[in-house]
Image (tube, rainbow, N blue to C red):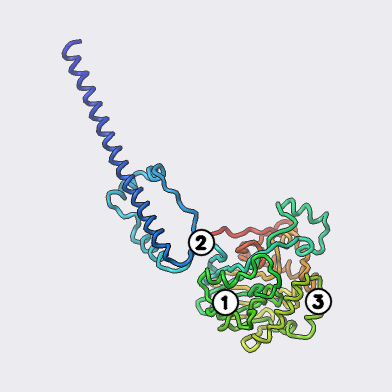
Amino acid sequence: MNWRTWRNRFAEVRAYTTATTKRTLTLLTITMAIDIVFLSFVNATASVLARSAFNLEIDMIKPPTILTRRSVFRAGTGLAVAAMGTPLLTAGSAQAEGVRQAGAEPLNGDGFYRFKIGDFQATVISDGYGQIPISPVLAMNASEAELAPVLKANFMQPVIQITNNILVVDTGRERILVDSGFGEKLGPSFGSFPGLEANLGRAGIAPESVDLVVTSHGHLDHIGGFVTKSGALAFPKAQFVFVDTEWNYWTGSRYESEVNSSPMPDGFKKGTIAAARDLPQVASRSRFVKQGGEITSGVHYIAAPGHSPSHATILFVSGKEQFMHMGDIAHHPVTSLQRPNWSPLFDYDPAQAIKSRKSILSRVATDRVMAMGYHFPFPGIGHVVRREAAYHWEAAPWIW
């Protein structure tokens, strides 16, 4: 090999070594930048966790994002730029982050769920949950042969969990609470009821801040929370609103004998009568509205009798948005929507209740109105979709 060949080979080796060294230095630089960003994230997270130990109870925490060197490395150029001093948050996102941290409202979950009805701020508050048998409670007139295939098709067990979903709506003028759950009148403990007071607290809603308590009807699980066991009003500054004829029935002379002769479970009978006996305590703070009348601006009763003598649903309207609180028109998305002719044993007039159920379901399906089921799986909001001769429930996607 002559000297020219050696010189050329040496030049090739030197060029390769230089290029390799540059790539190695570049990789080391990027790795150091990644380490800096990774450690910044870890330190920031540790700082936040340390501060949070002194905060009030956090109501719901999102599943954490797990940071690893690999996941940070995948961020590529953006993280390398961040490591050189570029802020991770733009001015707008930083402002939004500051507002979120400064204030206020805890995240959805742990007994409450926030959403919007046009310009209205709405919150569903859980009063708890308990186990009930589908037959006969939700399908009194369905045979085992009729019930079994429906349960199988919907992956349901004969005993299911039932809930009470309490709606709170802030219209900008008033804070409205629809129904009040079981309160302390159920007798022996049933499931996790009552949970309204605790979950209102978690959502940052003080009972004293409620302006209107709107009643869909007079059953125990809707008016039981008006008065506490000690005799105090649970919502001391609120005005109570009823359909006038529903109030007349539950403060009249017939309800007690009719409840006792109904197919309701004995504990529910006893609690319903006890809750009705408390109504005179709110009489001086009550306002009575004609069936189908306006409750307040943007809020109306919609007649839906049968489940109780003057049961009503409640329609909220804000701008172009509508929302229907269905009360007890439908108790479960399967038994009530897929089989609207099945009757729960709590219906006062089952035939009339079926007519009202079909009317309200048809309305919200045709108009594509978001609706709420008081006893549907929490938070109980979604849409009713027409399917053949019946209906199907499309639950609204959970938004954190």
How many numbered discs? 3
Q: Which residue is mark 2?
A: 60
* Amino acid on which the number 3 mark rests in the picture: Asn
Q: Where residue 133 sits in the image (x, y, percent)?
A: 75, 61
Task: Judge by depth and name the residue closer to the eye, 19 or 172.
Answer: 19
Q: Does residue 302 show up?
A: no
Q: Where residue 282 sits in the image (x, y, percent)?
A: 64, 85
* Amino acid on which the number 2 mark rests in the picture: Met
331 displayed left or right of 95 = right
Q: Residues within 10 Å of mark 3 (few under 14, many from 20)?
A: some
> Compared to 277, does 396 lie above or below?
above
380 displayed left or right of 340 = left
Q: Are marks 1 and 2 in contact (CB under 8 Å)?
A: no
Instruction: Name the secondary structure under disc 2.
Output: loop
Q: Which residue is mark 1?
A: 176
Q: Which residue is mark 3?
A: 260
Mark-to-mark CA distance, 1 and 3: 32 Å
Mark-to-mark CA distance, 2 and 3: 42 Å
Q: Does residue 361 show up?
A: yes
Who's the residue at 73% across and 76% down the image?
272
Task: Judge by depth and name the residue closer to the eye, 56 or 141.
Answer: 56
Q: Where residue 187 sits in the image (x, y, percent)?
A: 71, 73
